């Protein structure tokens, strides 16, 4: 698919995902319990990690689709802080939702998902570079075909 055809879809996916995060954060909270079961705690915090892992991937995809430059590191350097900024704004938003509270600790948990996304993108990029080097090496040094008539 041509990069220009991908542009609106990558931006739409990002906007939809940001809307999902906003909608989840808008749900009023109940009375906080001091005795929160460990499984419930892990599920809630795991959702934070997943939400921001996906957000990072989508922001990176939009930067890749809309940028005319080919600078991998700069796109990653922008995607990380933009994701973190959204995480922070989400916690600020929760301060005005009844029964919810914005926690800086949750931004730290969101940062884990963001860091995982950065790692995944970096590893995929490295894998792609290795594959490209192998392909280029094969093209530059093709194996000589044996002539069946020569002994």
Image: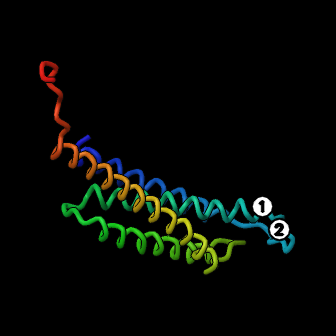
Which picture quadrant has residue 67? bottom left
Quarter of the view holding residue 139: top left
Q: Are marks 2 and 1 in contact (CB under 8 Å)?
A: yes
Q: Which residue is mark 2?
A: 36
Location of residue 29 in the rendering, given as x and y in whole percent from the top left corner = 72, 67
Task: Determine whether the residue tagged by mark 2 lies in a helix, strand or loop.
Answer: loop
The residue lying toward the viewer, choosing from 91 and 59, is 59
**Residue 27 x %, y %:** 65, 62
130 is higher (above) or lower (below) than 114 = above
Q: Which residue corresponds to the image point at 48% horizontal and 55% vertical from the top-left?
A: 17
Query: Residue at coordinates 46% horizontally, 75% vertically from top-left?
Result: 85
- Where residue 45 appears, as percent x and y from the top left, is 67, 65
Left or right: residue 130 compared with residue 83:
left
Q: Secondary structure at mark 1?
A: helix
Q: Residue furthest bottom?
A: 104
Locate residue 128 relative to residue 71 in the image: left or right. right
Alpha carbon distance from label 2 to label 1: 7 Å
Please give the name of the residue rendered at 36% of the width and 68% of the height, measured from the top-left corner. Answer: 76
Q: Is residue 117 visible?
A: yes
> Residue under circle 1?
40
Q: Nearer the viewer, residue 117 or 32?
A: 117
């Amino acid at each position: 698919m041509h990069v220009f055809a991908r542009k609106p879809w990558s931006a739409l996916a990002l906007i939809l995902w940001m809307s999902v995060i906003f909608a989840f954060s808008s749900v009023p909270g109940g009375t906080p319990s001091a005795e929160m079961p460990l499984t419930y705690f892990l599920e809630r915090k795991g959702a934070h990690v997943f939400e921001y892992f996906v957000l990072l991937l989508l922001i990176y995809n939009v930067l890749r689709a809309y940028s005319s430059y080919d600078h991998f590191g700069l796109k990653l350097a922008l995607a990380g802080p933009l994701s973190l900024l959204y995480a922070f704004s989400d916690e600020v938003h929760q301060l005005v939702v009844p029964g919810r509270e914005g926690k800086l600790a949750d931004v730290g948990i969101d940062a884990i998902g963001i860091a995982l996304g950065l790692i995944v993108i970096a590893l995929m990029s490295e894998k792609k570079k290795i594959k490209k080097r192998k392909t280029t090496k094969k093209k530059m040094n093709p194996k000589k075909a044996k002539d069946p008539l020569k002994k």
